[in-house]
Image (spheres, helix red, strand yellow):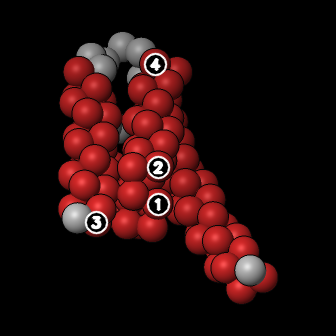
C-alpha cells in the first residue's frame, strides 16, 4: 500500500507542476505578450497524461485548463472575441474523453 500511495503522490505532483506551467503560459501570453498566439498546445500534455492515468477522472484537468483559459481571456483580453477559447475548451474535453474511453477499453 505504501508504494502505491507514493506513486499516486508522484503522479499528482507532476500534474500540479504541469498545470502551474500551463497557468504561467496563459498569463505570459495574455498579459505580457498581449497576444492570442496558440500556446494552448502545451495544455494537451497534462490533459493526455491525466486521462491515461486516471481515465475519466482526468476530465477534471481538461475542465480546469479550459476554465483557466476562459477566465484569463475575460480578465486580460476582454476586447477580443472569446469564441476561439470556447472552441479550445471543447477540444480539451473531447480529447480527454476520447483518450479515457480508449484507455478503458
- Secondary element under disc 4, as helix, strand or loop, is helix
Q: Residue at x 78, y 82 (%)?
A: 2
Residue 57 has which mark? 2
- Contact between labelled residues 1 and 2, with CB atoms less than 8 Å apart: yes
Depth check, mark 4 against mark 2: the one in front is: 2
Mark 3 burial class by Cα count in 10 Å: few <14, some 14-19, many 20+:
some
List the single residue furthest toward the top. 79
Distance CA(mark 2)–CA(mark 1): 5 Å
- The image position of residue 56, as x and y in percent, is 39, 50
- The image position of residue 71, as x and y in percent, is 50, 25
Residue 103 in view: yes
Residue 74 has which mark? 4
Pick the quarter of the image with the N terminus.
Answer: bottom right
List the single residue furthest toward the right. 2
Q: Which residue is mark 3?
A: 103
Distance CA(mark 4)–CA(mark 2): 27 Å
Q: Which residue is mark 1?
A: 54
Taking 52 as reference, is 97 above or below it? above
Amino acid at each position: 500500500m505504501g508504494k502505491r500511495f507514493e506513486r499516486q503522490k508522484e503522479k499528482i505532483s507532476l500534474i500540479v507542476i504541469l498545470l502551474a506551467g500551463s497557468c504561467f503560459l496563459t498569463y505570459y501570453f495574455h498579459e505580457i505578450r498581449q497576444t492570442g498566439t496558440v500556446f494552448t498546445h502545451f495544455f494537451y500534455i497534462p490533459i493526455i497524461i491525466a486521462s491515461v492515468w486516471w481515465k475519466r477522472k482526468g476530465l477534471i484537468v481538461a475542465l480546469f485548463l479550459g476554465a483557466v483559459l476562459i477566465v484569463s481571456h475575460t480578465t486580460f483580453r476582454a476586447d477580443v472575441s472569446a469564441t476561439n477559447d470556447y472552441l479550445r475548451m471543447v477540444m480539451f474535453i473531447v480529447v480527454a474523453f476520447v483518450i479515457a474511453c480508449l484507455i478503458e477499453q
